[in-house]
């Protein structure tokens, strides 16, 4: 693939902007500056540099972000910053999307990708990918509430009760809840329907993929092959 196309597919601007980066001597491959936009390179294991920033070629972007509170999962946020402001500009420019959404005040594991089939696979209601949350509740948890969540609670606007796949207390006011759907404010509404109130919410797992303890709030990382396999096995 020619160098101009490589930069373009990786989100470094329009074709004209990518061409200018190359001609201006701001792009290097294997440590050598390349000023010819038509120079061709094998992309399988290609790593290049733009203004000293090392970037590996990837056909698709598969990412995880430890979402902090105060960010909206939207490119056009209404009241808070966008989660896309936490990513390098090339990732936002290449059309990375949130794989599902977390509320502004919900923290934790957020997947992002520019692979439409991947996004659809993990947001489709038919797939029923389990998602595990930790909820801090206003009132102490009890067996009645936990049983109601496991047996199913009726949410406003729904015709059938919705049951949690897992509902257990990790502490007096700390609830682990796993759901297989992704309805609007579902976890908060389920907790309210069970007779309590959600004060804070954190997503720690999607399918078999857990948020790494090493990934600090606001940080992101590429999904490696093991993590992608964990998702595919969900």
Image (cartoon, grey):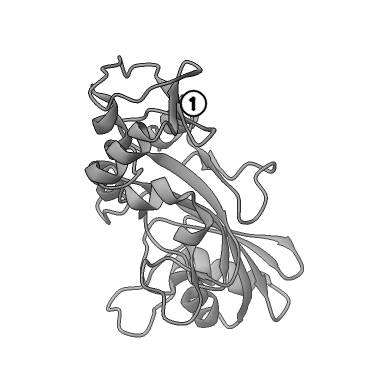
Q: Relative to 87, does residue 115 appear above or below in the rendering?
A: above
- Pinpoint residue 190: horizontal percent, then vertical percent: 48, 74
Question: SS class of the residue under badge 1?
Answer: helix
Q: Is residue 40 visible?
A: yes
Label 1: how many Cα within 10 Å (few below 14, some 14–19, many 20+): few
- Pinpoint residue 87: horizontal percent, then vertical percent: 49, 52
- Pinpoint residue 223: horizontal percent, then vertical percent: 48, 35
- Quadrant of residue 56 in the image? top left
Residue at horizontal 42%, vertical 32%?
228
- Pinpoint residue 187: horizontal percent, then vertical percent: 49, 70
141 and 173: which one is in front?
173
Quickly name the residue at label 1: 226
Residue at horizontal 30%, vertical 16%?
41
- Quadrant of residue 38 in the image? top left
Q: Is residue 96 visible?
A: no
Residue at horizontal 50%, vertical 45%?
64
């Amino acid at each position: 693939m020619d160098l101009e196309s490589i930069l373009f597919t990786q989100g470094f601007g329009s074709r004209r902007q990518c061409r200018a980066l190359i001609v201006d001597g701001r792009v290097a491959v294997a440590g050598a500056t390349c000023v010819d936009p038509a120079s061709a390179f094998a992309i399988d294991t290609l790593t290049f540099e733009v203004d000293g920033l090392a970037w590996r070629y990837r056909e698709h972007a598969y990412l995880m972000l430890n979402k902090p509170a105060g960010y909206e999962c939207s490119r056009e946020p209404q009241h808070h910053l966008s989660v896309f402001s936490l990513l390098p500009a090339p990732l936002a420019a290449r059309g990375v999307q949130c794989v599902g959404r977390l509320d502004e005040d919900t923290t934790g594991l957020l997947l992002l990708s520019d692979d439409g089939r991947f996004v659809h696979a993990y947001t489709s209601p038919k797939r029923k990918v389990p998602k595990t949350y930790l909820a801090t509740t206003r009132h102490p948890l009890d067996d009645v509430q936990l049983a109601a969540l496991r047996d199913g609670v009726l949410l406003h606007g729904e015709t059938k009760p919705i049951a949690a796949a897992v509902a257990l207390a990790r502490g007096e006011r700390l609830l682990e809840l796993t759901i297989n759907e992704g309805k609007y404010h579902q976890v908060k509404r389920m907790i309210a329907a069970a007779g309590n109130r959600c004060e804070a919410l954190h997503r720690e797992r999607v399918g078999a993929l857990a948020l790494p303890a090493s990934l600090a709030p606001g940080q992101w990382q590429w999904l490696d092959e093991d993590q992608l396999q964990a998702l595919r096995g969900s």
